[in-house]
Image (tube, rainbow, N blue to C red):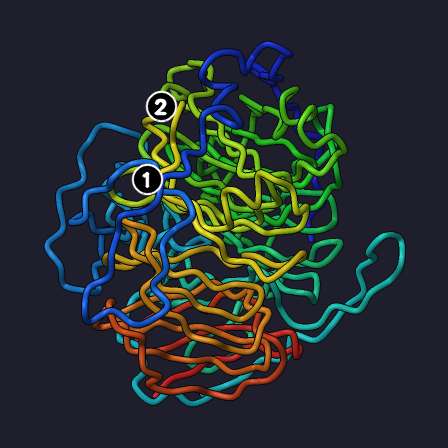
């Protein structure tokens, strides 16, 4: 494998939030005048399932007709995408290819709003088609060695057409310390694995513009950009977790990157967010090149958060989300930030336009609907007053930064509970899988719970919905399919397939197949 030469990084500007950077409405958005304990007036209709209790906060009376946009697999009428922004708000629920990218499932949850789950048909009676042995490796935790097997959270496979060919491939990072590339028809290794220095927990990103490039994090302290047009996967650049100081927490990279307009957006467990100008091109030999430049980096914490929680747990483990011109991310203390990056290609410095404190560790990615509303799934680890007041499922309106909570509700069963899986949006529902083992169907407009499915927890695998089928993995190794054609009724089980080991990874659905790994050390393909 080729070695990496020194890469000169030119930092155009670095924004570290000063003591007074969060003054005024931006600062107060995290803790002042947020909660309004009004009794919810929402009621359930006669055909809703039992268990549809009220959200714990309901600040504004939402439009009852508001619906989350559907994926293209539903056959619904789709509005045009042309709002002049970096990522059109109306692109929620739609494949990244609708924005001009290559076809496929290219990043965690498929698009920049983290709301695209794959392409049908979904198998009607799936069986194991083939398996691939991932195996195990060691990775230390707190200085002590630990054996990690298979793939885990988030671990969603990418499904993509190999650059420059007609062949489709399945790619995924795993606990064998490698990104693996398989033939989706046979499960045979289709390309040499890309080996990193430690395990890979997150989801890889395939270049959406057709450049033969892979973007992946690892626990080896580097974020990697890898060329796929050589005889073997070849690293072109690595971003060290210690590249810019100060940092907090550790040097892992768990998030799935976004690439938009030749800019890379990524957050790290070093508690920093980065924007990197890639300068992608093809050399005179026809091979892909990059000349990365860090153009922006900011801390995941601010002085106000330090005053609230102290310590150093500010890591960004979720995957960044872009809706409109704003990139959103949160951290392990629950601070949500939104930065306007619409002018970055013109050299304009990003500006913080949103700040909200959810109160607790948030590893699940933020999802954005077709109206620009944000949905959070939050853990319950600190047991503080903020977490108890807000709950663990929160809908935010970032256009009202002083008063953003549309609704919020509880989803906890004591300390060390809550939500690790990223919520799914489908039609008029928010679907949330909890650590305790509940799958909750929540009205997206009102926050009222419509139904609940109980499965063996913990549920860290994020729910996936394609063609009215809800797919959810559990921790006994069963992958379930539920009928979601009527969102007001508790979904009935259509099928379940016994795999092996806890399913922490998020499944990928593509063209009649389902791909997912488990902690057993095995990767599975399912089909009819």
Q: Which of marks 1 and 2 is in front?
A: 1
Residue receiving disc 2: 342
* Residue at 42%, 33% in the rendered image: 262
**Which residue is at the far top?**
20
Left or right: residue 386 versus residue 1 is: left
Looking at the picture, tell me which residue is in the foreground, 26 or 265: 26
- The quadrant in which residue 346 appears is top left
Q: Distance between the residues labelled 1 and 2?
A: 18 Å
Left or right: residue 137 versus residue 462 is: right
- The quadrant in which residue 343 appears is top left
Left or right: residue 131 versus residue 138 is: left
Tell me the tag on residue 336: none
Residue receiving disc 1: 373
Residue 410 screen position, x and y as percent = 49, 54
Crowd rating for badge 1 (residues with CA inside 10 Å; few <14, some 14–19, many 20+): some
Any part of residue 313 in sight: yes
Looking at the picture, tell me which residue is in the foreground, 400 or 254: 400
Residue 180 screen position, x and y as percent = 58, 66
Residue 316 screen position, x and y as percent = 61, 40
Looking at the picture, tell me which residue is in the foreground, 9 or 76: 76
* Residue at 21%, 59% in the rendered image: 72
Mark 1 or mark 2: whose residue is earlier in sequence? 2
Considering the numbered disc 1 on the image, is that residue within a helix, a strand or a loop?
Answer: loop
| Residue 473 against residue 506 in the figure, above or below | below
- The quadrant in which residue 477 appears is bottom right
Residue 321 screen position, x and y as percent = 43, 41
Any part of residue 112 in sight: no
Considering the numbered disc 2 on the image, is that residue within a helix, a strand or a loop?
Answer: loop
Left or right: residue 241 versus residue 254 is: right
Quadrant where the C terminus is found in the figure: bottom left
């Amino acid at each position: 494998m080729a070695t990496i030469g020194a890469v000169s990084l030119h930092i155009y500007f670095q924004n570290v939030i000063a003591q007074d950077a969060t003054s005024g409405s931006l600062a107060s958005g995290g803790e002042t005048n947020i909660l309004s304990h009004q009794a919810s007036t929402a009621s359930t209709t006669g055909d809703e399932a039992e268990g549809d209790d009220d959200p714990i906060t309901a600040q504004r009376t939402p439009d009852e007709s508001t619906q989350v946009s559907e994926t293209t697999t539903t056959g619904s009428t789709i509005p045009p995408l042309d709002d002049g922004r970096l990522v059109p708000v109306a692109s929620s629920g739609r494949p990244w290819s609708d924005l001009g990218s290559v076809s496929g499932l290219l990043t965690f949850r498929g698009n920049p709003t983290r709301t695209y789950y794959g392409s049908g048909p979904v198998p009607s009676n799936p069986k194991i088609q083939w398996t691939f042995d991932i195996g195990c490796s060691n990775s230390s935790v707190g200085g002590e060695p630990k054996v990690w097997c298979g793939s885990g959270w988030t671990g969603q496979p990418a499904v993509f057409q190999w650059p420059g060919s007609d062949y489709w491939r399945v790619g995924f990072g795993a606990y064998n310390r490698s990104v693996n590339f398989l033939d989706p028809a046979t499960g045979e290794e289709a390309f040499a694995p890309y080996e990193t220095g430690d395990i890979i927990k997150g989801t890889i990103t395939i270049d959406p513009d057709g450049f033969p490039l892979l973007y992946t994090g690892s626990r080896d302290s580097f974020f990697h950009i890898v060329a796929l047009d050589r005889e073997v996967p070849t690293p072109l650049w690595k971003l060290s977790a210690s590249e810019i100081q100060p940092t907090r927490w550790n040097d892992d990279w768990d998030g799935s990157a976004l690439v938009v307009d030749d800019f890379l957006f990524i957050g790290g467990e070093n508690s920093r967010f980065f924007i990197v100008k890639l300068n992608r091109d093809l050399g005179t030999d026809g091979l892909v090149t990059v000349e990365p430049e860090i153009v922006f980096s900011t801390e995941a914490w601010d002085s106000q958060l330090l005053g609230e929680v102290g310590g150093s747990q500010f890591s960004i483990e979720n995957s960044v989300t872009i809706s409109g011109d704003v990139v959103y991310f949160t951290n392990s203390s629950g601070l949500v930030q939104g930065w306007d990056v619409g002018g970055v290609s013109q050299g304009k410095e990003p500006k913080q336009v949103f700040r909200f404190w959810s109160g607790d560790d948030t590893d699940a990615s933020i999802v954005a609907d077709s109206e620009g509303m944000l949905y959070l799934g939050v853990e319950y680890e600190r047991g503080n007053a903020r977490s108890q007041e807000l709950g663990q499922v929160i809908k935010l309106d970032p256009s009202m930064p002083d008063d953003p909570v549309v609704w919020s509700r509880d989803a906890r069963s004591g300390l060390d509970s809550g939500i690790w899986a990223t919520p799914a949006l489908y039609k008029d529902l928010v679907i949330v899988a909890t650590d305790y083992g509940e799958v909750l169907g929540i009205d997206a407009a009102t926050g009222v719970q419509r139904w609940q499915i109980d499965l063996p927890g913990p549920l860290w695998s994020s729910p996936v919905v394609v063609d009215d089928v809800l797919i959810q993995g559990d921790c006994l190794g069963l992958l379930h399919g539920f009928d979601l054609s009527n969102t007001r009724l508790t979904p009935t089980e259509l099928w379940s397939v016994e795999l092996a080991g806890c399913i922490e990874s998020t499944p990928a659905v593509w063209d009649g197949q389902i791909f997912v790994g488990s902690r057993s050390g095995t990767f599975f393909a399912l089909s009819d």
